[in-house]
Image (cartoon, coloured by chain):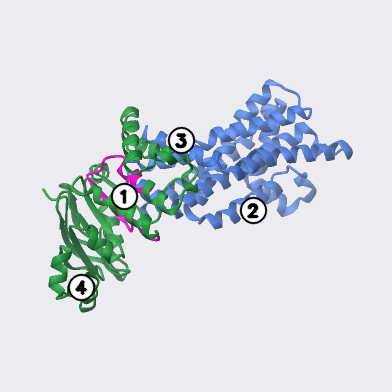
Amino acid sequence: MDAIQTLGLTKQYKDVTAVDSLNLTVRQGELLSLLGVNGAGKTTTIKMLTGLTRPTAGDAFLNGKSILTERGAVKEMIAVSPQETAVAPNLTVQENLELMAGVHGLPKAQAMDRIAVLQDRFGLGAVAGKRAGKLSGGWQRRLSIAMALISSPQILFLDEPTLGLDVLARADLWDMIRSLKGKMTVILTTHYLEEAEALSDRVAILKGGRLLVTGTPEEIKRCAGTDKFDEAFVRIVKEGQP
Amino acid sequence: MRGLAFSKRNDLEVLRDPLNLFFGVGFPIVLLLLLTAIQANIPVSMFEIQHLAPGIVVFGLSFMTLFSATLIAKDRGSSFLQRLYTTPLTAADFILGYLLPILPMCLAQSALCYGAAVLLGLKVTVHMALAILFTLPIALLFVSLGLLCGSILTDRQVGGICGALLTNLTAWLSGIWFDLRLVGGAFQKVANFLPFVHAVEMERAVLQGDYAAVFPHIWWVAGYAIAVTAIAICAFLRQMRRQ
């Protein structure tokens, strides 16, 4: 079974079609990047897939569960790390992780085990007692992703995870995201083309709410007739078709 | 269990903000001290401690709107709520999670105010315990106002509307600092149509053990509390759908 399958997924806001009849398939354990310029429909697609907004038409199935009729089951299997760092600033790192474990209904012992594993994996142990609001942007982003992983989601949505981070913090996060590959399905949105090329198994390029092309970074470059990924992206988006 | 985790978080967020502690506890007690000192030098019946303390308790509770609204508006502005909307938490978990943790804080704040008033000469009676309990409908009114404002305003707007406007409305239209009959006319009519003066009069009546005088004030307070809570729930659900 595919991890995600969208069938004519559409979102209309008054006169604007934010996402137009999107048909997209994401395989189990795959890391797929959604690329596109501002207004391409990336965030709206993620909002529909995570149940934050209801499609105007079409449907999507996450591990076979409909986002329209099985929202509860969908919520149990997904996690989101939003574009802005969504942490509780007056809570410590440990308390933020406990909060997410609590809202996902993890039993106390299991929650503590999971928190210990994530603190170890993300190097958060040293700052466990520090308030999240006092952490640097890079550490907050680490915490934000760790919070998303607390429930061991089957599908993880990472919305611009490295936006605004310096080179070293970004490299650290890339390593963390790479370590997730194969363990869960990851949908990544990013404006950094080198990030999409380095991390993705496949890339989907959107423009004006429509899907222009999907493929591996190599396939995209071949398709656009260039050996540079950023050039390929620009060509595809400018021409509106591969 | 899930809602409890969210409530606990809200509890900690409010209690760990030093400004909340200053305005929630420090400011009402400073007012009590100041006005009692004035009363000692220039005796005014309004500022006698048994008259003043219930008013300060109600005025202190008005800050709970600010705390509650700021928390919700900040959560909305920072995508924290969006993250939580993708978890299995239900709408009821969110609403109760924002309302319930503030209510015990209101009781604690009222107890501290009455405690300070005791140090300033207020007699300890069994009525005082009941007066603290009677703050619950008043607390629900102010906390629900916070849910309402937090659901429709940004955190900057909340500072102006709840921090300045509401606290001033509570102060001027509640009969804490002056007898509303001295102004009379439309001012008194408007004040009597709003819940603040009724909240103060109800507290004063309970503290004095004059339970017959609790009516009709309690109906005004309870009516406003129920209506505002219902409107706040609708506003919260509306913004939840919009997210």
Q: Is residue A201 above or below residue B219?
A: below
Q: Of the residues shown, which amino acid type is indicated by label 3?
A: Lys
Q: Please check whether the numbered discs 4 and 1 fall on a single chain.
A: yes
Q: CA distance from mark 2 to mark 1?
A: 37 Å
Q: Please check whether the numbered discs 4 and 2 fall on a single chain.
A: no
Chain identity for the colour blue used in the image? B
- Which residue position holds label 1? A80
- Residue range (magenta): A144-164
N-terminal of the pair, mark 2 or mark 3, is: 3
Residue B117 position by quadrant: top right
Q: Residues within 10 Å of mark 2 (few under 14, many from 20)?
A: few
| Pair 4/1: label in front | 4
Q: Are marks 4 and 2 in contact (CB under 8 Å)?
A: no
Label 3's element?
helix
Magenta residue check for B169: no
Q: Of the residues shown, which amino acid type is indicated by label 4?
A: Ala
From the viewer's perspective, tell me whether residue A235 is left or right of residue A107.
left
Q: Are marks 4 and 3 in contact (CB under 8 Å)?
A: no
Q: Is residue B225 above or below residue A9?
A: above
Q: Colour of chain A?
A: green
Q: CA distance from mark 4 to mark 3?
A: 49 Å
- Which residue position holds label 4? A232
Chain of the residue that carries numbered disc 4 in the rendered image = A
Between B202 and A92, the residue placed more toward the observer is: A92
Q: CA distance from mark 4 to mark 2?
A: 55 Å
Q: Measuring from the top left, give residue B142's x and y in whole percent.
A: 57, 43
Q: Residue at x 32, y 44 (%)?
A: B87
Q: Residue at x 55, y 32 (%)?
A: B104
Which label is found at residue B164? 2
